[in-house]
Amino acid sequence: MNATLTRLLALSRRTAIVAAMGLTCSTMLVQASPQPPATAQGGTAGTLQVGMAYVVPPFVDGAKVRTPEAIDTALAEALAGKLGLALQAVPARPAGKDILLGKDKPRATLAVLPDTQSLPASMVAVPTGYAAAPMAIMRTDTDIKSWEQLKGRTVCLSEGGRHVGTLSARYGAQEMVFRAPADALLALRIGECDAAVHDDVMLKALLKLPEWKKFSARLTQAEAAPLVFLASADDTALVGALKQLAKEWKARRHLAALTASRVNDIAFEVYLDQVVADCH
């Protein structure tokens, strides 16, 4: 327990910093207020507009710090930084050839796209190096042994998760969607749900932590879907920056480090909330 506390307390400084930076970072995200005039490629002057399935809401002063489900924002921020621009994240739900690109549309879009071969020649897909499949974790004494046995059972997920809606549609599970992974995982720990479902990349890293040993029962799937950046083939500057970033990320094992950091933050957020709940 001492080792766990030491590791978690060491993370508190980073959590405090994230809280302090939250309001500043939120100005980079798209909001409901009217936007300034767009440039020819979408977005405002000095910004890079990136479409993603879920735009993290702006941080509200006094709210709990929460690490989002997807890594999209972190990757988009890295791209914007490489281009010397500020990120303007916008919601976009791409569907193959219907991806939004061009005037007044995202200059780039992050999408889970297993079949990039179906893209038109005018579009380029640059793999980020991140690929994940859905994974469920449960208490080790669970009686759930297959995905089909989730029928009628309560499954906790988080906003921005790529698996929201799929558990009820495919297996008849009762989905409970929480604000962030920490909230969904806390609900699992205190018995509000039978399973929690997130990307396997995140959950496999989480289960390496000793405090999650009692929740190591799992359901996995073999098909990992890649996360890619989509851009216009004519935007050579952007495509070049994307390919260079992907190459750098692979060489530095950046995505593995990012995952480890995010998992530690999520575990710390769960720990803090559970300690507060236990104290009351």
Image (spheres, rainbow, N blue to C red):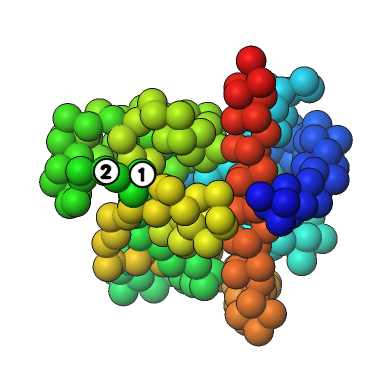
Residue at x-position 34% and y-position 49%: 140
Indicate the secondary structure of the residue bearing disc 1: loop
Residue 32 visible, this orientation: no
Residue bearing mark 2 = 142
Q: Residue at x 64, y 77 (%)?
A: 253
Q: Kindly state the secondary structure of the residue where label 2 is placed.
A: loop
| Relative height, residue 9 to residue 152 (above, below) | below
How many dots with numbers? 2
Of residue 201 and residue 239, the one placed in the foreground of this image is 201
Q: Is residue 206 visible?
A: yes
Where does residue 130 sit, x and y in percent of width and height? 50, 67
In this figure, which residue is indicated by the disc labeled 1?
A: 139
User: Does the CB distance between marks 1 and 2 fall below 8 Å?
Assistant: yes
In percent of width and height, residue 169 lies at 19, 37
Q: How many other residues sit within 10 Å of disc 2, few (<14), some (14-19) or many (≥20)?
A: few
- Comparing 111 with 151, the one in front is 151
* Residue at the top extreme of this rendering: 280
- Relative to 98, residue 19 above or below: above
- Image position, residue 206 (x, y; %): 53, 55
Say which residue appears at 58% left-offset and 42% top-offset. 68
Residue 197 falls left or right of residue 219: right
Please name whichever residue, 256 or 142, is drawn nearer the observer in this view of the structure: 142
